[in-house]
Structures are given as structure tokens and as C-alpha cells.
Amino acid sequence: MALVSVKEMLEKALKGKYAVGQFNINNLEWTKAVLATAEELKSPVILGVSEGAGKYMTGFKTVVDMVKAMIVSMNITVPVALHLDHGTYEGCYKCIEAGFSSIMFDGSHFAIEENIAKTKELVSVCNKKGLSIEAEVGSIGGEEDGVVGLGECADPDECKKIADLGVTILAAGIGNIHGKYPENWQGLRFDVLEKIKAKTGDMPLVLHGGTGIPTDMIKKAISLGVAKINVNTECQLAFQEATRKYIEEGKDLVGKGFDPRKLLAPGVEAIKATVKEKMEIFGSIGKA
Ligand code: 13P
């Protein structure tokens, strides 16, 4: 199946009261693990690529070619979207050109007028090419230079202004943050989510910072209009833990245990297990 935009899969998710996971990819192993799990569980899936990860993989074109080739070689039949995560204005154009099926323009750090102008321009480009576009209002906090922000809440009126520009999906800060949640985190602001939903109607909403949000909060967020949930750190932690265990147990020192295909295998299995667990919680299994 060719790469698809997120539009149809998220409209279905919103109606069916489940969410589709965006799992960020970093390399071949990550991509293979996420695709294999989605196919096994017959779940639609969104592969997220940050600009840093794109650069790491030698460029967006490499990512597009790798993902498209894997869809063929792995006989992937479930809907797969390839989505730029937190794109800059320039990064969005690069991904559009490289063949991504979906982009996120993160204009949340611009003044609302500039965010609107740039989002509007990108919406028109994406519409012409049949791509989906995610916009962000109210920056999602997280760890930056060792300082953990607690996560801003988006202004529901600003959300409406951006939603009305014709974006496909909207990421709105509701106290969520990227990375691990600090001890003193107050939880998601469902009061804010309800207000945003009331203003934005049928627009599928996106919950960033999916790592470490308790299951009951995830389910409540889905019931209030969240149809896409982003997960990155949790797969990284699972990979790290399994790889550490393999080396600490000295398995790399036995026979051909140093072979990267063996060395990385436990990490890959750990990513698969994490993706499966998330898809179960999000309710996307069997929805492809
Ligand atoms: P986590 O790393 O907290 O899972 O967040 C992922 C994310 O929101 C990517 O945009």
C-alpha cells in the first residue's frame, strides 16, 4: 500500500473513539519494528520523523525511500503515514519535496499572526498535493537544556483560529510535555481540552508527549476528541533497557553475540512490545 495522509485514518478514529499512534523512528530497526507490529495487529500507523532524526538518517529522501521500500518488502497492507514531527517552515518544504505524506508545522513559538500566515500558506500547498498537515498552538513543554517546563495550555480561541485555516489535525498544549513527566506534574488539563474541543468541532486533536501518561488519562483524552497520540521517548527507553541488559549479561561476548543483528535484536523486540502495548491502550488494533 502506498503512503497515505492521516486524514482518513484520523476521521475514522475520531468517529470510532480510538486513537492512532504516531511512533517516532530513528533508524532501520525502529522503522521495521513499528511497521511489523502495525501489520501484525492490523492497526493503522503514523511514522513520525523529527528534523534531527531525518538528518541522522542522512536526509528526508533516504527516509522516504526506506519506508516505501519496506512497505513493499514486508508486505505491509495497513495504512501508513509518514509524518514530519515538529517541522520548521523550511523543514516542511523539504519533506513535501522528499515525498512525505503528512507534515506538522510547529509555529507555536511564533506570534499567533505569524503562525497563522505560515500555516495558511502550508495548508494551501498541502491541499494541492493531497498531504495532511498538523498545526500546533501553545507550545508543548519538555526538557530543554536540562530544564523541564510544565507544559503550556493552549488558548481555545487561538486553536479555533488555526483550525479554521483548514489544517487536518491540531496539536494543542493541555499540560502535556515531551519526555519523562516530572514528579510534580499536575496531569492533563481536561477542562482546557473540553474548551478546545467545543471551539474546534470535528477537528481530530493530537496529544503529544504520550510517554508516561497514565492509561486512564489517555482514555479520557480519547473520549474528549484526541485521535492521534505521539510516542517517542518510551520506545527509546525500552530499546535502551533491553540493549543494556544484553550487554550487562555479557551476551555480546558469547559466540557471534557481537553481530549487530544479534546485539540490536532485544532492543527491537522491546520497541515492538511497547508499540503493541500503546496500540492496545489507544484502541487502534484491528482498525486498519
Ligand atoms: P514523548 O517523547 O514524550 O513520547 O513525546 C513524543 C512526541 O510528542 C513527539 O512529537
Image (cartoon, rainbow, N blue to C red):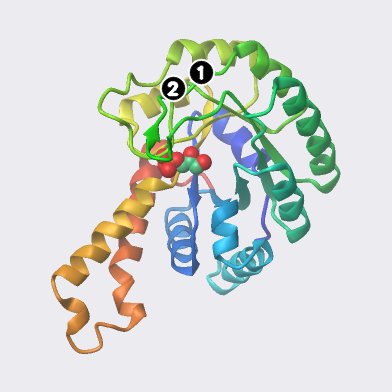
Q: What is the secondary structure assignment of the residue under circle 1?
A: loop
Tally of marks:
2
User: In whole angstroms, how far apart are the C-alphas of marks 1 and 2?
Assistant: 6 Å
Q: Earlier in the sequence, mark 1 or mark 2?
A: 1
Q: Is residue 106 above or below residue 223?
A: below
Q: Which residue is mark 2?
A: 175
Q: Is residue 285 above or below residue 201?
A: below
Q: Residues within 10 Å of mark 1 (few under 14, many from 20)?
A: many
Kind of residue at disc 2: Gly
Quadrant in which the N terminus appears: bottom right
Give x and y (percent) for residue 127: 82, 40
Q: Which residue is mark 1?
A: 153
Residue 243's quadrant in the figure?
bottom left
Kind of residue at disc 1: Cys
- For the point 35% across and 65% down, the residue is 268
Give x and y (percent) for residue 134: 66, 36
Q: Is residue 10 left or right of residue 133?
A: left
Whether the residues at callouts 1 and 2 have beta carbons within 8 Å, the answer is yes
- For the point 30% across and 54% down, the residue is 238
Q: What is the secondary structure assignment of the residue under circle 2?
A: loop
- For the point 28% across and 67% down, the residue is 266
Q: Is residue 192 above or below residue 235?
A: above
Residue 192 shows up from this direction: yes
